[in-house]
Image (cartoon, grey):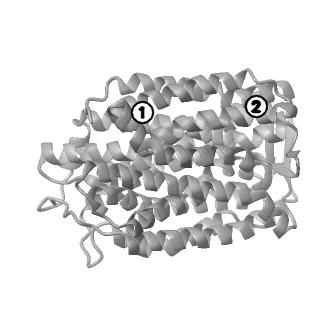
Amino acid sequence: MAKLSEKIGYALGDAAAGGITWKVMSIAFPLFFTNIFGLTVADTATLMLVARLFDVVTDPMMGALADRTQSKWGTYRPWLIFGAIPLGLVFALLLYTPDLGPVGKRIYAYSMYLLMMAVYTAVNVPYGSLLGVMTADDNEKNEFSSYRMVGAYAMGFVTLLSFPYLQKMVGGTPAHQYAVLGVVLGALAALGTLACGLLTKERLKPVRAEKFSFKPFADLFRNKPWIILTLIGICTNFFNGFRYAVAGYLLEYCLHGNVTVSGLIINYTVFMTFGEVTCMIFGGLSPAFTKWVGSKRKAFNWAAIICAVTSIAFFFIPMDPKYIWLMIAMVILTSIGIGFYSPLLWSMYADVADYATEKNGTSSTGLIFSSGTMAQKFGSAISGALVALLLGIAGFVSGTDATGQTVVTITNEPAVQRMIWMLFSLFPAAIALLIVLLLRLYPIKK
């Protein structure tokens, strides 16, 4: 039986990766790249698409490499211990806007973003794989997974809620604010990752193949539960990715800037914070909800239905700041579904890893969990790229002029506003309904 300190330590890993680095990258980066850094919409979309092709190669390779790691710290923990500082450092550099022209900025953004993806992979794939070797008890896996999600959403809540106030405290230009916050948040991410590596334990020994081969890669595509769950994982991150990537544009261009209610500054990060705290609460309730409905698959199905219905309902809210609390209420209701399914996804990956070990005779835990990380990055970044692309088609134009200044132009405001509203509501709703269909094909009944 794992101690509480170990569960908290495991939660700190996703508090760092999911609650700080990935949360900021998902919600702030599209708006940051177009409105502050000065990339064009096309460059922003292309950057995220190129990074996904990069991840298709690096994530499975990292999973296979992690599976074969042997050290006094274990199989997966050393990647967290020694990857913590590079993760924080590269994240800080990514939020820095250099004083360069359009070409120089493009080179810097591509280099730092790809490097960030590589470092994130080197830390997060082994982190996810830890769940498969910390315990053999299925209920305890659910508990670890629940602690993980609570950690991610709790830190996401703190990060997003404090963001506008920290910006105001730092002062100066938006570029300066993001650079300073990159250093602060990067340091916190490094500390959380290091603590996770030091506080957790690996109790189970992976069943290793005698020598390296490509057979585990081939086995994945004969593993029906893995195929279906990976598609579901991509869809969940498409669902979240659309909403996070477009939230900044929604506040800026549909509600015409920050909304202040009784002294509370509601910008795009605070707007999504209400969802974070809801996800934190219902992520903690996910194991109990799963027991109540009878299986992980049924619980996931109900959670996806909640997400679909509430997302459709958001579309019919008037595009007016005076309805801000109704919008927030719908974000909260949607986040109940997200909170329920988020821990289930990683617990189900552990089930798939167990299924693969039993079927193939050797462990491919790291490889299987790498697909979860790849699905996370693929879904979030492709959705971010699509947001940038579709906004560009609707009439949103951004870039850097000859003096290095960021320039944003709206050529068709009603079309841009309509596209933003749909990207936050109807697009995610369609993805949630697709998840419901995929769950019907998932064969593991736990």
Residue 392 visible from this viewpoint: no
Does residue 298 sit above or below 371 in this rendering? Answer: above
Amino acid type, mark 2: Leu
Mark 2 — residue?
A: 326
Residue 227, image quadrant: top left
Camera-nearest residue between 397 and 363: 363
Expressed as whole percent of the image width and height from the top left, the position of residue 75 reads 27, 68
Camera-nearest residue between 400 and 438: 438
> Quick one: quadrant of the C terminus?
top left
Does residue 283 sit above or below 410 in this rendering? Answer: below
Q: Give how far apart the Cα atoms at labels 1 and 2 are.
A: 26 Å
Q: Which mark is residue 300?
A: 1
Q: Is residue 186 left or right of residue 359?
A: right
Camera-nearest residue between 99 and 326: 326
Q: Say which residue appears at 79% left-offset and 48% top-offset.
A: 267
Expressed as whole percent of the image width and height from the top left, the position of residue 135 reads 26, 58
Q: Which class describes the residues within 10 Å of circle 1: few (<14), some (14-19), or many (20+)?
A: many
Q: Say which residue appears at 27% left-offset and 67% top-offset.
A: 202
Expressed as whole percent of the image width and height from the top left, the position of residue 438 reads 39, 26
Q: Which class describes the residues within 10 Å of circle 2: few (<14), some (14-19), or many (20+)?
A: some
- Label 2: element kind: helix
Amino acid type, mark 1: Phe
Tag 1–tag 2 contact (CB < 8 Å): no
> Quick one: quadrant of the N terminus?
bottom left
Q: Say which residue appears at 21% left-offset and 48% top-offset.
A: 216
Q: Is residue 151 left or right of residue 357?
A: right
Q: Say which residue appears at 43% left-offset and 24% top-offset.
A: 436
Q: Earlier in the sequence, mark 1 or mark 2?
A: 1
- Label 1: element kind: helix
